[in-house]
Image (cartoon, grey):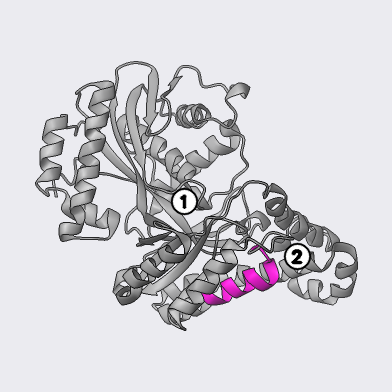
Amino acid sequence: MNNNFLLADQAKAQIASGTYDRKLARWYGVTGSALVSYRKRLISAIDRFTEIYGDRPLRVFSVSGRTELGGNHTDHQCGRVLAGGISLDLIAVAAPNDTTEIQVYSEGFSETRISVTETEIIPEECGSTAALIRGTAARFAQLGRPVGGFAAYITSDVLAGSGMSSSAAFEVMIGTICNDFFADAAFSQAELAIIAQYAENIYFGKPCGLMDQMACALGGVAAIDFEDPAAPRWEQIRLDLAKEGYALCIIDTGADHADLTDEYAAVPAEMRSVAVMLGKQYLRETEESAFWKKLPELRKACGDRAVLRAMHFYSENARAAEQASALRNGRFSDYLALVNASGRSSEAHLQNITPAGSTAHQDVAVALALCEKLLDGKGAYRVHGGGFAGTVQAYVPIGKAESFRQEIDCVLGAGACHVLQIRACGADALWDEQEGAE
């Protein structure tokens, strides 16, 4: 077990004095007086932990949310994606409790408790927080690193339902605590992402891919190839947006996700209908040349929207690889051009901007039009994540970021535009034995 714990008063004093400012700068992409609010947030979390669980030696952890940078609706076809950790995160204050029970209190929710001695799947827990915690504990035990009990208070500023993967960040957080407390940090960040995916797939009951967990765990930018979903290939790429002169803005369009299940389900279903006509299960397994040769037949059998969505997959899958290459080789202007191309393809071919039949309310389309107007040919913008509702992503020159935010908020409502940075580091502890106070 990691022995580098601090009592609450000692931890708060060091945070308040700026001892960990260099670490916080890596987490949040800001320095100086801008770190004051982050120090206060950490101190408040420690206070809340002690209110709930008492004053005991503790540790503080952070796991970021994520943003999809490329590969819009490619992952479910075994395609390529590009995702990044962001400066919105989950904070956990945690301590071993010398029992066999994991106690997790997430801000805004009731406490969840599970016994680490009961690692079998409980069908009634499917889709619950308890399932994610139990699945993580079970996987650690299966890998030869059984965990003990601990108490944790978790607070998050990752926007729920925004495509920033608050659930994946939570899964990675539980694994990060277990790894630190009970496994001597034996598992890498990538391995923690795979453990998180296991908990969500097997115990929670959602057959997710690995993109969200990997981006939350690794930080930076993760280029992931799902050609073999059981063994995805990935590469971590560093991106310093501030150095490039841009801020990343995520815009909450205000659209409601309710009643959109059929819209979301139709995208993979229609893509797969084209793949089946080409003799495969997923579009990634097909030859694009065969698609174009059979286009008249495919239009008749699958419909025009399906073939347009397949066209999007072929171009977007290649584009995700090109985006990774552009970042890897320092060609940021080329990267921005590819972001814009991704947005155009999603709008024209994937058609995940406006729900079918919706004319009075076209929230995502309005947000995209605002970005086009305000950016005036500079930067880039695109639909973010699933589409139809949710969020839009924009790369805004740093000098225009504040005015851009104000203009967006004026139209879409206060707090609609969130100015972020790509997070430099992945799942992390505020202090550790090797580093000590920074």
- The amino acid beneath tag 1 is Met
Residue 245: x and y, percent? 32, 76
User: Badge 2, how many Cα within 10 Å: few under 14, some, many 20+?
Assistant: some
The residue singled out by tag 1 in the image is 214
Quarter residue 366 falls in: bottom right
Determine if residue 71 is in view: no
- Vertical placement of residue 210 versus 58, above or below: below
User: Badge 1, how many Cα within 10 Å: few under 14, some, many 20+?
Assistant: many
Residue 410: x and y, percent? 42, 65
Range shown magenta: 339-352
Residue visible at 79% across and 58% down in the picture: 280
Does residue 40 appear left or right of residue 344 in this picture?
left
Residue 227: x and y, percent? 63, 58
Quarter residue 46 falls in: top left
Q: Give the mark nearest the N terminus, 1 or 2.
A: 1
Does residue 350 appear left or right of residue 83 in this picture?
right
- Vertical placement of residue 242 versus 37, above or below: below
Tell me, yes or no, whether the two marked residues, 1 and 2, touch with CB atoms within 8 Å: no
- The amino acid beneath tag 2 is Thr
Q: Nearer the viewer, mark 1 or mark 2?
A: 1
Question: Magenta includes 260?
Answer: no
Which numbered circle lies on residue 286?
2
Quarter residue 298 falls in: bottom right
Report the quarter where the N terminus lies. top left
* Main SS category, magenta section: helix
Is disc 2 placed on a helix, strand or loop? loop
Question: Magenta includes 345?
Answer: yes
